[in-house]
Every structure is written in structure tokens, then in C-alpha cells.
């Protein structure tokens, strides 16, 4: 999700995170054999529509500052979104960001459904499950940092960029505001 956030504005990021309920609902039906009522399916369809509209708006309006457009103009823009994405780096970045966030939501939904399955099937303390979840998340994040640093961050093009772990560590340790905010983020998540 955080890599996707690099490519989209925060409002699109937050709305795209709403896809989590869609995937959890579908995975619960498929894997846990849960039954959803009609109003729940309607709610999921409403979320799909909302997330789709926000994503489309982000791809279509990424370079015009969100100016108002007529319905005909929006229809024309919608028809041209793929062509624009090939020509416009901003639109292409938005689409890539949305896809990364959506992929992360699928991963998170899988985790939630798996946790529900484990807690229903086995007698485990929920606090221990959360602890193991944190250890797993830390491990995956650490592995991701290492892989992205080695693949991108240490290249000449990636140096001082998003995936340069050495530069990131330097900024955390040398700039008090970055270090403090990093610790506060960790505490707020934990």
C-alpha cells in the first residue's frame, strides 16, 4: 500500500483502501462458506462502484487540478483513459498506484480471512495471534526493504529515492522530526 501511495494522491489512496471490504466479503463467501444477505451484497456493490469512480477520476483528472467537467467531457475522457495512460506519466502512475494498493488489499483480506479461519478452528489466544501477526508483518516488511534496496535503491537511478534504505536510515537518524514521526507511526499501528 505504501508503494502505491507514492504514485497517487492521499485521497485516492484512502478510497482505494476501501476495496478491503470487497475482498474480505468475497473471500469469506468462497473460503469460509459464509452467507451474505442481499443488503450486504448491495453494500459491497456500492463500495465497488465508489472505489471504481474514485480510481477513474484519479486517472482522468490527474493533470487538470480537478476542474469541473460536463458529462459529455467526462464520457469522452473515460473513452480515452487507456490512450492517455500511455501518453501521460501522471495517469499511468495513478493506475499503477491503484493496482498496487488493490493488490495489497487482496493480501490483507487473505490475512483477515485466514485469521478468522484459524481462530474459529483452533483454541488460540487472540492476543498471541496478533503478536504473531506483528512478527510476520515485521519480517515481510524487512524482507521487502532489503529486496527493494538491492534491486532498486542501490542503483544510480534509485540512489536517494524511495527504496534507498541507506538514505532512509540516514534521514531517520539525522532529522529529529522524521525519527520521531517514524516512532509515533509505529506506536499508533501497534
Image: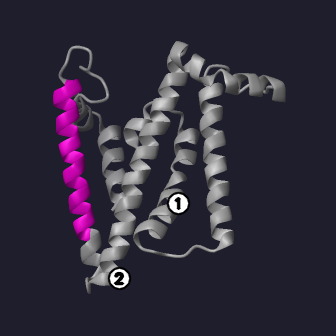
Q: Between disc 2 and disc 1, whose residue precedes?
A: 1
Identify the residue at image location x=38%, y=65%.
112
Colouring style: one colour
SS category of the residue bearing label 1: helix
Q: Is residue 144 above or below residue 38?
A: above
Q: Specify whether residue 61 is painted magenta.
A: no
Choose top left, top right, bottom left or bottom right for residue 66. top right
Location of mark 1 (residue): 21
Q: Which mark is residue 120?
A: 2
Identify the residue at image location x=66%, y=41%.
53
Q: Residue furthest bottom?
A: 123
SS category of the residue bearing label 2: helix
Q: Specify whether residue 141 is painted magenta.
A: yes
Q: Quadrant of the N terminus?
A: top left
| Residue 73 coordinates in the image, percent (x, y) | 79, 23
Disc 1 crowd rating (10 Å Cα; few below 14, some 14-19, many 20+) is: some
Choose top left, top right, bottom left or bottom right for residue 45. bottom right
Q: Which residues are magenta?
A: 131-153
Q: Is residue 32 left or right of residue 15?
A: left
Choose top left, top right, bottom left or bottom right for residue 83. top right
* Residue 43 appears in view: yes
Amino acid at each position: 500500500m505504501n508503494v502505491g501511495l507514492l504514485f497517487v494522491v492521499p485521497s485516492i489512496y484512502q478510497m482505494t483502501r476501501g476495496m478491503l471490504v470487497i475482498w474480505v466479503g468475497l473471500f469469506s463467501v468462497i473460503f469460509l462458506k459464509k452467507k451474505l444477505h442481499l443488503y450486504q451484497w448491495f453494500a459491497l456493490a456500492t463500495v465497488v462502484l465508489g472505489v471504481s469512480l474514485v480510481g477513474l477520476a484519479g486517472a482522468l483528472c490527474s493533470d487538470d487540478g480537478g476542474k469541473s467537467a460536463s458529462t459529455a467531457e467526462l464520457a469522452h475522457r473515460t473513452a480515452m483513459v487507456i490512450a492517455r495512460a500511455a501518453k501521460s506519466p501522471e495517469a499511468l502512475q495513478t493506475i499503477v498506484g491503484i493496482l498496487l494498493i488493490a493488490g495489497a488489499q487482496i493480501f490483507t483480506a487473505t490475512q483477515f480471512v485466514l485469521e478468522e479461519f484459524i481462530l474459529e478452528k483452533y483454541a488460540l489466544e487472540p492476543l498471541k495471534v496478533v503478536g504473531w501477526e506483528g512478527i510476520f508483518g515485521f519480517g515481510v516488511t524487512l524482507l521487502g526493504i532489503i529486496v527493494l534496496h538491492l534491486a532498486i535503491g542501490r542503483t544510480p537511478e534509485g540512489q536517494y529515492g524511495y527504496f534507498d534504505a541507506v538514505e532512509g536510515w540516514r534521514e531517520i537518524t539525522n532529522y529529529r522530526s522524521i525519527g520521531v514521526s517514524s516512532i509515533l507511526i509505529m506506536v499508533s499501528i501497534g
